Image (cartoon, helix red, strand yellow):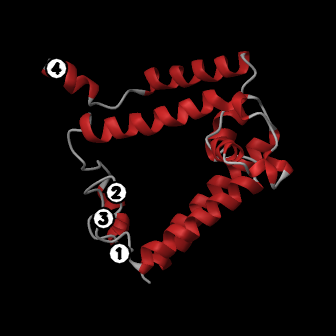
Amino acid sequence: MNKVIEFIQQPWPWWVSGPLIAYIMFSLLYFGKGFGLSTNFKTVCNILGADKFSDFFKFDWRDQIWNLVFVTGTIIGGFLAAHYLTPSQVVAISPSTIADLKAIGVANPGASYEPEMFNAENVWSLRSMIFLLAGGFFVGFGTRYANGCTSGHAISGLSNLQKWSLVAVVGFFIGGLTMTHLIMPYLMKL
């Protein structure tokens, strides 16, 4: 039994997870579905009555039940993996990355999956709340402006050979690199 638990606790290799993602994408294409997590926010808003205030939310939310089940499974799976399938919260990152993170003010990089500025002791600080609110705004605005999220464009859109998904993914990478190398070091020193 211990061997099974040790096997489950290891990351899946690319040659297992990659074909599984491809299988899911081909299945979605076959059934005429598109994948994206941000669609769930639109669906939940519709369920809560936002269609009475905006035509953007006027659609039959029942067509998106499969996506709500998926995101629910993602949340449950993440909880189970974090609490029962992860032998250690220590993150294996390279020494150069640890040095870079320490240089911008991260005290214990790799000590856990949860960044220290958002752990239970620090999450209610003014700095963390500003980061969370501003980050949430930019992610929400960007998702709506790009007409989809990173998973929708990078996995589903590129699988469908949509040129605007390619443009969006290139933009995501440029934004991520800009944030990582230019903006985040400055913000961490505030």
Q: Residue visible at 58% across and 63% down?
A: 136
- Residue 114's disc is 2
- Residue 3's disc is 4
73 above or below 26? below
Question: At label 2, which amino acid type do we have?
Answer: Glu
Question: At label 3, which amino acid type do we have?
Answer: Ala
Q: Nearer the viewer, residue 139 or 56?
A: 56
Question: At label 1, which amino acid type do we have?
Answer: Gly
Mark 1 surroundings: few (<14), some (14-19) or many (≥20) residues within 10 A: some
* Residue at mark 3: 120
Q: Nearer the viewer, residue 118 or 17?
A: 118
Q: Residue furthest bottom?
A: 190
Q: Is residue 64 left or right of residue 58?
A: left
The answer to which of marks 2 and 3 sits earlier in the sequence is: 2
Q: Residue furthest left?
A: 2
Q: Are marks 1 and 2 in contact (CB under 8 Å)?
A: no
* Residue at mark 1: 105
Determine whether the residue tagged by mark 4 lies in a helix, strand or loop.
helix
Nearer mark to the viewer, of 1 and 3: 3
The answer to which of marks 1 and 3 sits earlier in the sequence is: 1
The answer to which of marks 4 and 3 sits earlier in the sequence is: 4
Q: Position of residue 92 (x, y in %)?
A: 29, 48
Label 1 to label 3: alpha-carbon separation: 19 Å
Q: Is residue 89 left or right of residue 22?
A: left
Label 1 to label 2: alpha-carbon separation: 15 Å
